[in-house]
Amino acid sequence: MKKRKSRALTAIAVLVVLAVIAAAAMKIGLFERKNTVRDEPVPDWVDVQLIDIDGASRRGVKLEEINDIVVHYVGNPGTTAQQNRNYFNNPDSEVSSHFVIGLDGEVIQCVPLDEKSSATSERNRDTISIEVCHPDESGKFNDSTYRSLVRLTAWLCDTYGLSAEHVIRHYDTCGKECPLYFVRHEDAWEQFKADVDSAM
């Protein structure tokens, strides 16, 4: 009888210890869950203007999973979010992103969150892409644009269970200098990720 009680207490103690270890590991991100791909309703500060399914810019192909959020810059200084969205809607462009953030901080959604965009080559299969407008050749985002980028990125991370470490630059996938300012100013990139983390 004593042996049976002792074994039961030992088993309970082991289970409690394992539960505590598992909870701690999940909290620090050792066990990351696969993110369920789903099209989430966006906040009311996002203007939904989905581009047409055309087989090039938007193929209508579902994402395999969502592992990272990719930040891009549009590369054409002074253009608006609307102009870039309209460019994506041209099948000859063969490019798109899930979102475009404009010079006044406006956010336009171009592709549903459960579909691939045409922005990050082989990483289109498991990423959400954000294109960001910039006023000049430096690629630096103005304050309104930057605030919206932080807000949108934090919302996406919260929605899909990602940490700020899952926010990457286009550069991190292929070496392209995109977004230019964040590639050339690593300190600004690290500050952006810290701002996203604080906003979550």
Image: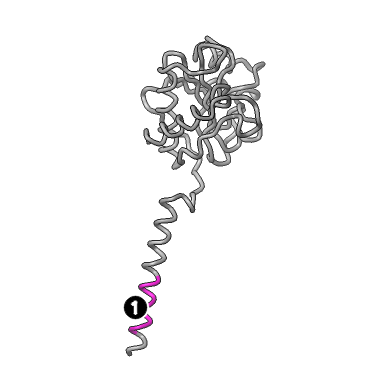
Answer with left or right where residue 135 lies relative to residue 199: right
Answer with left or right where residue 177 lies relative to residue 16: right
Query: In the rendering, at what x and y percent does residue 94 appear?
Result: 65, 21
Residue at x 35%, y 83% (from the top left corner): 6
Res 33 visible: yes
Question: Which image quadrant: the N terminus?
Answer: bottom left
List the residue tagged with mark 1.
Answer: 9
Residue at x 46%, y 49% (from the top left corner): 29
Residues in magenta? 5-14
Q: Residue furthest top?
A: 78
Query: In the rendering, at what x and y percent does residue 9 appear?
Result: 34, 78
Residue at x 53%, y 29% (from the top left corner): 186
Q: Is 30 drawn above or below residue 88 in the view shown?
A: below
Give residue 185's quadrant in the image.
top right
Give residue 11's quadrant in the image.
bottom left
Q: Is 98 drawn above or below residue 105 in the view shown?
A: below
Q: Is 48 drawn above or below residue 5 in the view shown?
A: above
Answer with left or right where residue 143 lies relative to residue 133: left
Query: In the rendering, at what x and y percent does residue 127 appear?
Result: 55, 35
In the image, residue 60 lies in the stretch drawn in magenta? no
In the image, residue 7 lies in the stretch drawn in magenta? yes
Query: In the rendering, at what x and y percent does residue 124 appear?
Result: 61, 33
What is the magenta segment's predominant secondary structure?
helix
